């Protein structure tokens, strides 16, 4: 119930924001339209009674002219209402989408985006704009139907209070049944949300170039088709079961309505034969009962439909009103320029309570102006360390400090404004080359000189300049970016993995004011020459900057001031390259193993393989 109230308040707020004038206009039109059917029924009664009584033409002029005027209104007003409703719906949809984006910015970390239930809710919330638009339409239709119904109820009561009571009482089980169906359908939509989101995965495979290579090479088409059809079958089975329930309930309600209408018609004919009702009264009664039943059915269906929409809209309202996923300081301390360094104090972390520890009591200091390299085997916690320093997560135990201040006491946006980063899983945006670099610092989006300088420093300026439209070239073949409306938009291009790596590096270089640089596998996917070039560029850029360097390429980190070796979530070794080599521990073993591959291949290990595999 609380969720429904919040959904109603949220939807009302969206309508209010969309424009009070439009809302007032729709309310006025709703009032007028609701009275038109009842007015037509009464005017028709007057005309028929006048004709039967052979009244003079002068007595028919007013009701006839009124009928014509009402007919014109019946024909014209729905179109006006449709236009106003669509315009309000567009504004509501736009504002709903904007509020959703603003709400998503409140999520400080990454944990919600790794939770299937949250992603299911988010997919439904993303439809909040269209849901809000439908709610607006349904609300005004519901109001119009209710007012029309009230008019017909009054009309039937004047002729037969008993018949009005029968029709109204018959609407009670219809209302209960329809609301129950609405709740079941809303629940069904939520239950199949994971399956439908899974369908999006298969849809993505259809249009993904990266997937297309393996799909064709490995002959995965039939396999993926079977999986996709199975997923679709699960959702369709649930929808089919719901439709069957709808069919049985709706058929029963329609039969009940037909029996009541038939009984009322028989009563009206008998009453007219006995002289209790006039011919006009019979006409009025038939129209009123039909209108009453139709209005009641519309009202019941409208209530049920609106209830279902509110239940689905609640996912939008839940997201919009969700608190931040990480605690925020009531009065955050300013994240000033780094002066002394970054310190990790006994940091423990795991991604969920039922998962193993990734970091187990890590204590490290990164002094100002120095470079700390973190190396280790896969799964040792290197990238997790980078995520914690960006405050995408908080330590389960321990703390991380910026110039002695706990990151949890800083404004996350303020902290991140002082960070630069190149992630191993960097984004490849379906934007222009200019925008793909500018996302590193949006203040430079209109400053091509700054963007080009960053590209030059990353060694990708020449490659971008040779593209068909230079920095305005779309780096995608999935979409057409209308960058030059005067001519047909050009087809976009795709970059190589190494070129994308340099674009990501240019984003970091664009943020030249950053105090702390995080480089997580910045040269993965590069050939040896490109890797050497990139590390030289990064070394120049890191000069006099505080930085964290994560890499599997140990030759790339040997120049770091300090090297930390992570093993099983703890700092197993700490020191400079020469010091660690002299210690002849894990670092020395990994370094020699990598180096030996450039001189002579190490012997292959003997594996006990099953001949049948």
Image (cartoon, grey):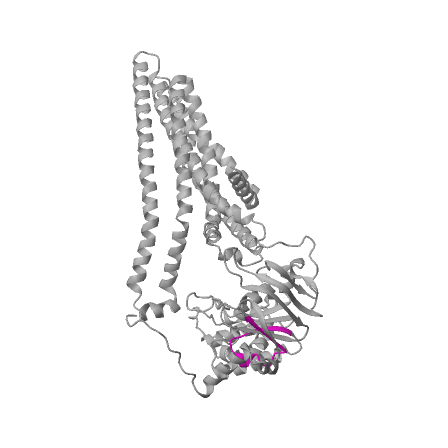
Residue 353, how many percent across, how many down?
52, 55
**Which of 338 and 136 lies nearest the eye of the viewer?**
338
Q: In this view, does 108 lie to the left or right of 150?
A: right
Residue at x 48% of width, y 38% of height: 139
In the rendered view of the protein, which quadrant contains the C terminus? Answer: bottom left
Number of numbered markers: 0
Q: Where does the magenta region start and end?
A: 546-566
Q: In this view, does 255 lie to the left or right of 588?
A: left
Residue 306, how many percent across, how many down?
45, 38
Residue 397's quadrant in the figure? bottom right
Q: Does the magenta stretch include residue 261?
A: no
**Which of 340 and 499 lies nearest the eye of the viewer?**
340
Residue 265, how many percent across, how many down?
31, 21
Residue 128 appears in the figure: yes
Q: In this view, does 45 lie to the left or right of 26?
A: left
Residue 202, how many percent across, how many down?
36, 59
Image height check: is 426 above or below 227? below
Identity of the residue furthest to the bottom in this view: 599
């Amino acid at each position: 119930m609380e969720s429904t109230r919040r959904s109603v308040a949220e939807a009302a707020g969206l309508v209010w924001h969309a424009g009070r004038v439009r809302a007032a206009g729709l309310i006025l039109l709703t009032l007028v339209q609701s009275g038109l059917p009842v007015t037509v029924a009464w005017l028709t009664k007057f005309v028929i009674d006048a004709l039967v009584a052979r009244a003079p033409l002068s007595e028919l002029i007013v009701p006839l002219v009124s009928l014509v005027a009402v007919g014109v209104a019946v024909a014209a007003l729905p179109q006006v209402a449709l236009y106003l409703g669509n315009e309000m719906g567009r504004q509501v949809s736009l504002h709903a989408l904007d509020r959703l984006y603003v709400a998503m910015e409140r999520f400080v970390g990454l944990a919600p985006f790794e939770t299937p239930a949250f992603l299911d809710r988010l997919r439904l919330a993303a439809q909040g704009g269209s849901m809000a638009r439908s709610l607006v339409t349904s609300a005004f239709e519901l109001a119009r139907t209710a007012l029309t119904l009230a008019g017909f109820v009054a009309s039937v009561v004047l002729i037969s209070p008993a018949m009005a009571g029968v029709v109204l009482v018959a609407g009670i089980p219809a209302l209960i049944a329809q609301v129950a169906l609405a709740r079941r359908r809303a629940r069904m939509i939520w239950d199949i949300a994971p399956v439908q989101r899974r369908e999006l995965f298969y849809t993505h495979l259809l249009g993904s170039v990266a997937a297309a290579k393996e799909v064709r090479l490995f002959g995965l088409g039939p396999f993926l088709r079977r999986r996709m059809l199975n997923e679709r079958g699960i959702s369709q089975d649930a929808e089919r079961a719901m439709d069957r329930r709808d069919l049985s309930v709706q058929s029963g309600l329609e039969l009940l309505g037909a029996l009541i209408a038939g009984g009322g018609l028989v009563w009206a004919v008998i009453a007219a034969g006995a002289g209790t009702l006039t011919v006009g009264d019979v006409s009025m009664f038939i129209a009123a009962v039909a209108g009453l039943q139709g209005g009641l059915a519309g009202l019941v269906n409208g209530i049920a439909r609106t209830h279902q929409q509110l239940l689905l809209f609640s996912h939008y309202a839940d997201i919009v009103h969700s608190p931040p996923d990480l605690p925020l300081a009531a009065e955050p301390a300013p994240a000033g320029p780094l002066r002394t360094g970054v310190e990790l104090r006994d940091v423990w972390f795991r991604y969920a309570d039922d998962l193993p520890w990734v970091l187990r009591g890590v204590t490290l200091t990164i002094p100002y102006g120095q470079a700390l390299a973190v190396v280790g085997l896969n799964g040792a916690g290197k990238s997790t360390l980078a995520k914690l320093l960006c405050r995408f997560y908080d330590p389960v135990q321990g703390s991380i400090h910026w110039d002695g201040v706990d990151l949890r006491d800083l404004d996350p946006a303020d902290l991140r404004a002082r960070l630069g980063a190149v992630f191993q899983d960097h984004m490849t945006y379906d934007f222009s080359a200019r925008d793909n670099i500018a996302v590193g610092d949006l203040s430079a989006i209109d400053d091509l000189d700054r963007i080009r300088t960053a590209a030059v420093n990353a060694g990708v300026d020449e490659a971008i300049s040779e593209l068909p439209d230079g920095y305005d070239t779309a780096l995608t073949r999935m979409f057409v970016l209308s960058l030059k409306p005067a001519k047909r938009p050009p087809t976009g291009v795709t970059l190589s993995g190494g070129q994308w790596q340099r674009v990501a590096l240019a984003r970091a270089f664009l943020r030249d004011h950053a105090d702390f640089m995080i480089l997580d596998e910045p040269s993965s996917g590069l050939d040896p020459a490109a890797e050497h070039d990139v590390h030289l560029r990064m070394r120049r850029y890191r000069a006099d900057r505080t930085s964290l360097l994560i890499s599997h390429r140990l030759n790339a980190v040997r120049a770091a001031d300090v090297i930390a070796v992570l093993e099983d979530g703890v700092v197993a070794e700490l020191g400079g390259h020469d010091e660690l080599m002299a210690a002849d521990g894990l670092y020395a073993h990994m370094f020699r193993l990598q180096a030996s591959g450039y001189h002579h291949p190490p012997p292959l290990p003997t594996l006990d393989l099953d001949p049948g595999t």
